[in-house]
Image: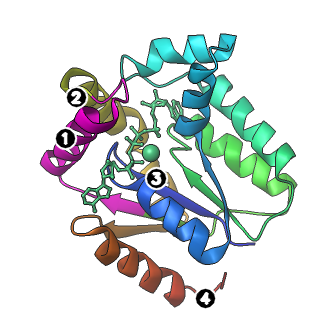
Amino acid sequence: MFNIIIFGAPGSGKGTQGQILTDRYQLTHISTGEVLREKIRKQTPLGKLADEYISKGQLVPDNVVIDILTKFFADNPTSNGYIFDGFPRTLRQGEAMDEMLAEKNESINVVLWLDVDDDELVERLVNRGKEMGRNDDNLETIKSRLKVYYQKTAPLKKFYSKQGKLVKINGMGTVEEIFSRIEKVIDSLSTKI
Ligand code: AP5
Ligand code: MG
């Protein structure tokens, strides 16, 4: 198996590039944000709870998203490889994920960090807010998402760079340009998909 974390700030392209990677390498993709939005659409109790955090640009509590990951592994016990988008976002989530993978004799192979300028992140998300209406894509919530990213999620870079797994990808440019940078990195790794 080949397990990838697609890492980066809100709007950095995790969903876009994650989907291309999933199709290209037949991986199993999970976006915790997508799972939570689906629960909000269905107005489940968990969805209602998550909405209170997401609409403010705050992180949903660790135990809620760790439970989502547990269910994901139970539903997808085997795969060519997993791709994690928007998870982990805190050190506690990273450690929980490592433990779950270790139980399967698996580990993360690479963390692809999509590095994008803040101005570009805001522009992409504001534009999407106008077109698609995700309720956290308004300027005030975007600013809070970015702040939370720098405070709580960006420190994970150190966690993965210590493990020798973090690879910085220039996330500026067209979707195709960025994907070809990702492909080069994956092709250069000693463990193959
Ligand atoms: P989540 O759904 O993960 O959102 P996010 O991290 O804020 O990021 P986005 O999904 O907005 O952006 P992306 O990086 O996927 O980029 P995309 O490809 O879409 O999380 C939402 C919320 O859920 C969180 O705030 C939190 O509350 C909660 N949550 C989720 N996971 C959690 C966890 N593990 N723990 C706790 N809470 C959690 O691209 C963005 C836009 O740019 C799109 O419109 C796209 O078309 C466009 N675009 C993409 N690439 C390019 C390009 N190269 N050039 C121009 N435009 C581009
Ligand atoms: Mg996304």
* Residue closest to the far left: 119
Q: Which mark is residue 143?
A: 2
Q: Identify the residue position indicated by label 1 in the image.
A: 122
The span shown in magenta is: 113-137
* 124 relative to 71 in the view: left or right: left
Badge 3: residue crowd in 10 Å (few <14, some 14–19, many ≥20)? many
Task: Tell me which corner region of the image, top left, top right, bottom left or bottom right, holds residue 177.
Answer: bottom left
Q: Residue at x 76, y 43 (%)?
A: 72
Q: Nearer the viewer, residue 71 or 93?
A: 71
Q: Identify the residue position indicated by label 3 in the image.
A: 15
Q: CA distance from mark 3 to mark 2?
A: 19 Å
| Label 3 close to label 4 by CB (< 8 Å) | no
Q: Picture coordinates of residue 86 (x, y %)?
A: 50, 44
Q: Identify the residue position indicated by label 4 in the image.
A: 190
Q: CA distance from mark 3 to mark 1?
A: 16 Å
Q: Picture coordinates of residue 157 (x, y %)?
A: 42, 53
